Amino acid sequence: MVAFVVALLALCIATGTIVLVSRRRPPGTFLTWGEAMAAAAFVFFTMFLAYGIVPHQWLAWADNELNWRADKILYGPGDIVAKLPFTVTYQVLRDLVAAGLYVVFLSGMVVLWSMCQARGKTKPAELPVSSYGRPLVKKA
């Protein structure tokens, strides 16, 4: 459990660092070769944490300490899962959580990309509207 929590904490710190740097850096600023290599290595490390280490540590924790095996059947609260026409084991639940981690990390990566690409862009000025929703613009 400690390894999973530490890996998740390291991923949160790395992601927070990416967000802070992307907000501070003005758009259009040129990178030096060294800055580009350092940024690429840091992003690779963050993706390695997200797609390699964190899911692996989850699977290791679920297999070893939680003991979620294929022979351990999930019944759920009030035996609600036992009434299903198929058997759900703890190993299936473990794999669903691991797949969910990948979906969350991929979604977060897309959000981070869109935040970095949209930085510095201003929203167009909104025209005042009447109570009927029509724009209040004087024609010259």
Image (spheres, rainbow, N blue to C red):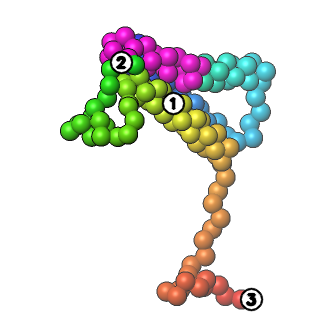
State the SS at label 3: loop
Determine the CA span between mark 3 and mark 2: 79 Å
- The amino acid at mark 2 is Asp
- Residue 108: mark: none
Point 33% across, 15% down: residue: 67
Give the residue pinned by disc 3: 140
Quadrant of the drawing holding the N terminus: top left
State the SS at label 1: helix
Which segment is the magenta one? 48-69
Point 63% across, 68% down: residue: 125
State the SS at label 2: loop
Q: Is residue 39 left or right of residue 97?
A: right
- The amino acid at mark 1 is Ala
Residue 6 visible in the displayed image:
no
Q: Main secondary structure of the magenta part?
A: helix
Whether 67 is drawn above or below 82: the answer is above
Name the N-terminal-most of marks 1 and 2.
2
Q: Is residue 66 left or right of residue 103?
A: left
Give the residue pinned by disc 1: 99
Closer to the eye: label 3 or 1: 1
Determine the CA span between mark 3 and mark 1: 59 Å
Q: Residues within 10 Å of mark 3 (few under 14, many from 20)?
A: few
Determine the CA span between mark 1 and mark 2: 21 Å
Name the N-terminal-most of marks 3 and 1.
1
Point 74% across, 88% down: residue: 140
Give the residue pinned by disc 2: 71
Q: Are marks 3 and 2 in contact (CB under 8 Å)?
A: no
Which of 48/122 is in front? 48
Point 49% across, 86% down: residue: 131
